[in-house]
Amino acid sequence: MVLLGTIAVTAIVAPLLARFDPNLPNLAHMSRPPGGEHLLGTDQIGRDVYSRLLYAVRVSLLVAITAVCLNTAIGMLLGSVAGFFRGWIDQVLSRIADAFLSFPVLPLVIVLVALFGPSLVNVIAALAVVGWPEVFRLVRGETLAARERDFVQAAISLGGGNARVIFRHVLPNILAPIIVSATFGVAQAILTEAGLSFLGLGLRPPNASLGNMLLDAQSITVLRSHPWLWLSPGILIVTIVLSVNYLGDWLRARFDPRLRGR
């Protein structure tokens, strides 16, 4: 949590920490190794790697958190409706979710972004569209179980409206697994965004993201002679994803009584 929080705060205050314009080439400082005024070196056209890394983390966290918030909201709404009303509404929504889940996530995201054009907004929208079915299945199952509990049945018997029962009594009592699922979803979204940017379908150059920084460093010459260009974004991706996954494991252990003693 400390490591992830530090990375997040660093990304937020990136304009204050960046010593150079992340998109400004400097032909006099091309491919310089780490040291001196360039802490992490420069790339092939003289841009400061440290400054670009700060802004790249900003993009990755923005995309991941926004996409997960959207797909979690969609999944919670549709899942609670399906689980609460059951019947034909449940059948229709479940079949739609099953249709989305029948496709691999990354190829489906690639198709959506390719159709609507590579941009930050389209990447977020694509991740939200393909991510809601997992949340839907989780919320639907939890809602089906919560609906049979005494306090929900009592609220229904006392004449509580459907919307009031769902938002006042059902959803607040099933938030724990949803929070855990959303945490793991952030890690998956970061990896997917990096993959899209590496394929040239994410944030457009010259703006920096962790994926397109790796894309710029994919040549054999760079891999062998300029390792600082791919090591720093690669290590940062691994660090963020591991931190988020460990946080998700900790939250799951805290919320699940069966795991608290382990």
Image (cartoon, rainbow, N blue to C red):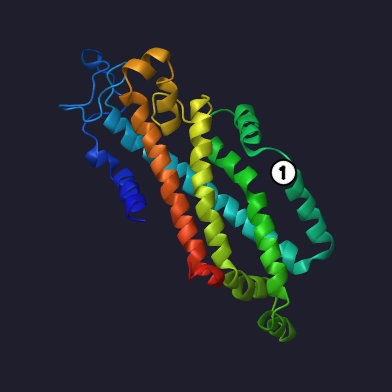
Residue closest to the eye, 188 or 115: 188
The image position of residue 33, as x and y in percent, is 24, 21
The vertical placement of 116 against 187, above or below, is: above
Question: Is residue 250 found left or right of 256 in the rendered image?
Answer: left
Q: Residue at x 25, y 25 (%)?
A: 41
Which quarter of the rendering shows the N terminus? bottom left
Image quadrant assignment for residue 23: top left
Q: Is residue 31 visible?
A: yes
Question: In the image, what residue type sits under mark 1?
Answer: Phe
Q: Is residue 94 above or below residue 206?
A: below
Residue 11 against residue 223 in the figure, above or below: below
| Image side of residue 226 versus residue 135, left or right | left
Residue at mark 1: 100
Taking the spot 49% from the left edge, 70% from the top edge, the residue there is 260
Q: Position of residue 153 (x, y in %)?
A: 72, 82
Total number of numbered discs in the rendering: 1
Q: Residue at x 22, y 26 (%)?
A: 34
Label 1: how many residues lie within 10 Å, few (<14), some (14-19) or many (20+)? some
**Which residue appears farthest toward the left when viewing the image?**
36
141 or 259: nearer the eye? Answer: 259
Q: Can you see residue 121?
A: no
Give the farthest residue toward the right: 88
Residue 226 image position (x, y, % from top left): 32, 19
- Along the viewing direction, whichever of 22 and 217 lies nearer the viewer: 217
Q: Position of residue 121 (x, y in %)?
A: 52, 38
Q: Secondary structure at mark 1?
A: helix
Rendered position, 115 above or below 72: above
Name, please, the residue furthest toward the front.
262
The residue sitting at 54% across, 36% down in the picture is: 123
